[in-house]
Amino acid sequence: MANVVYTECRGGQRFWTLFAGLVVLVMIGAVSALYMEHEGHIVTGMSNEIVWGLPHVFAVFLIVIASGVLNIASLGSVFGEMHYKPKARLSGVLAITFLVGGLAILVLDLGRPDRLTVAMTNYNFRSIFAWNVILYSGFIGVVIAYLVVQMTKAWVKFTPYVGLAAFLWRLTLTTGTGSIFGFLMARSPYASAVLAPLFIAMSLAYGLAVFILIRLALETSASRALGEELLQRLMRLLVIFIGSVLYFSGVFHFTSIYTAWRVDWEAYLLLDGGLYSLLFWGVYVLVGTLIPMAMLYGRTGVTRQREILATVMVLLGGFAHIYVIIIGGQAYPLKLFPGYEVTSSFNDGVVARYVPSLPELGLGLGGAALALAMAMMAMRLFRLLPKGNGESYGTAP
Amino acid sequence: MTDRSQSCGGSCGCKPEAETVDESRRGFLAGAAAAGATVLAPGVTLYAYGTAEAAAAGADPKKRWGLLIDVSKCVEGCTGCVTACQTENGWKTTGKPATDPQWIRKVTLRDPKSGATRSAPVMCQHCAEPPCADVCPTGASFKRADGIVLVDRHRCIGCRYCMMACPYKARSFVHEALEDQKPHAPRGMGTVEGCTLCVHRVDKGVAPACVEACAQTAGAIMFGDIADPKSEISKVIATYATMQIRGDLGVDPGVRYRNL
């Protein structure tokens, strides 16, 4: 029975330089949000057709990552995979910080962010959005409890139970995130129950990818080395997860093609969608899925650089995938009069145009930076990281 | 397995165990807590706001207000209903159709097989089962007892989920600061709005502005209580074939179209 020794990070020059860089990005995000709130959304690329823009892509990406990154902890305390247990604390903290980063973007992109208290005191329980407010805040609470029982010697015995609760909560949370789009019955690019499991698969893949990259970044300190065998396990898991995203994405699009009123949208996205087709096939399918799969498939000859590159490509593909779902789905015109060619002063029948503005990019990057900066601060303040090689530990509690 | 939180002695850049009582960390935590409280305090200021329930008070649950639009009478190129709505409710276009408010718009339809064209106004369809009200997290989007679908501008947080859910592109988000608002049609930057069926007029027993304007030219729009079988609008609906836009969705719009 081996001991796990957890320590804080003091950091050093590189640590604080990176942290300062992230703080600058957070400030840029804050200034962007203030600018948008003061001037109105007229300064963004969003419109009455593309009502959710680049900030939502960032927010959904971060929220999906938040629930997925917790899976590392779940592997230890729910599925009994002892090798992952020492990573559980970092996994839990990242889950919280990425969720906070994503939610910060969502809140600051509201037309009236000053009315946050209204959103917290008026719940329409028919709305999946309202349920998500509860799911998101509850998730933070459950994961904090999960961290506390892990880090309190007397309560360690409760870890499997709280871990199971956190695992079930995260599944429900991502189901809720996918359902935000799945419940939009009038829009042919959405309106599918498959979006919920697709979002869960995305969370597994992109959450794991983020965990791998952050863990490798921490490896710069020799005593934080990530075991090679464990890394290879994570990489094989990543291949399985991005394969499952491709599977659910395939099911989603095949069922849409089979549905008469949605086939036009599929023809647009898959063949004639210009930027959206390019992002889907080129960036998501090819760069973000097939090439990383090929790069990581072999068990020998996979270098560390190749692993990092493949993981970055997975995240790039994931971002493009969510961009296509959110922006591409809105750009495609609503069909009010099937069978007719429609024109109007409100661009009926026309694919909506969207060019993200700098404040939107600033807000999105600010939210991502906030997630990372909070994670760094947590690593500085709390004993989250195992000292030494992260592989040779005993059984899960 | 025993978890033990201890330090590595600082060899890897971590804090040594001897520094377990970490004053700098305590100081940082205290500072962070103070900063957090400072940032959050203004956010918890309570608002005095009117409620959707208050706005809906007085609506008669026995009525269901609706419109019937005879497309064969609607003149292509005529925008009298749009202009009347703008004048009545104080919204205007600024040449930016994607971000301008569009409470009501004229749509031109062309049958690609026959080449025949039709023209019709499209506005909030005042659904019996409004998707906008279903998805609204705060309940700002709501349906009055008499079927009129409205937005409580004091409760709207500007999330735009109702715009995603509306099958008719009938809602607009106020993208920029407003001037010269009408007292009976309050609007606000950062909130969502749409056709109110001129609820302020209806409550006084007057038809909506678009109906009044169209009556002076084409007479294509009829207004009335579609829940009352004796009303003129109900008699026409009972006599002639009419349709609802995207009636297949099952949201039961209160606006019907004839000769489409």
Image (cartoon, grey):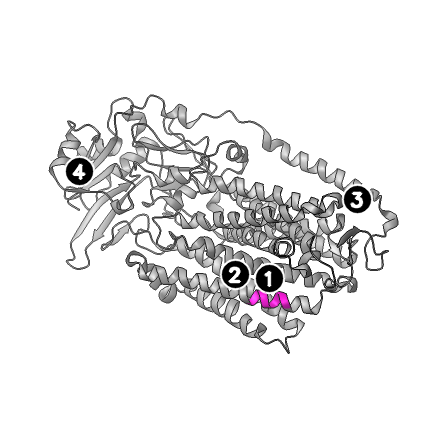
Q: Which mark is residue A318?
A: 2
Q: Position of residue B135 (x, y in %)?
A: 41, 40
Q: Earlier in the sequence, mark 2 or mark 1?
A: 1
Could you say whether the residue bearing mark 3 is in a helix, strand or loop? helix
Q: Which mark is residue B208?
A: none
Which residue position holds label 1? A209
Can see residue B62?
A: yes
Q: Are marks 3 and 2 on the same chain?
A: no
In-front residue for pair A71/A274: A71
- As drawn, which residue projects farthest toward the right? B18
What quarter of the picture does the N terminus of chain A occupy?
Answer: bottom right
Q: Chain of mark 3?
A: B
- Disc 3 and disc 2: Cα gap in Å? 37 Å
The reply to whether the C-beta atoms of the residues labelled 2 and 1 are less than 8 Å apart is yes
- Where does the magenta region start and end? A233-239
Q: Chain of mark 2?
A: A
- Disc 1 and disc 4: Cα gap in Å? 59 Å
Which residue position holds label 4? B220
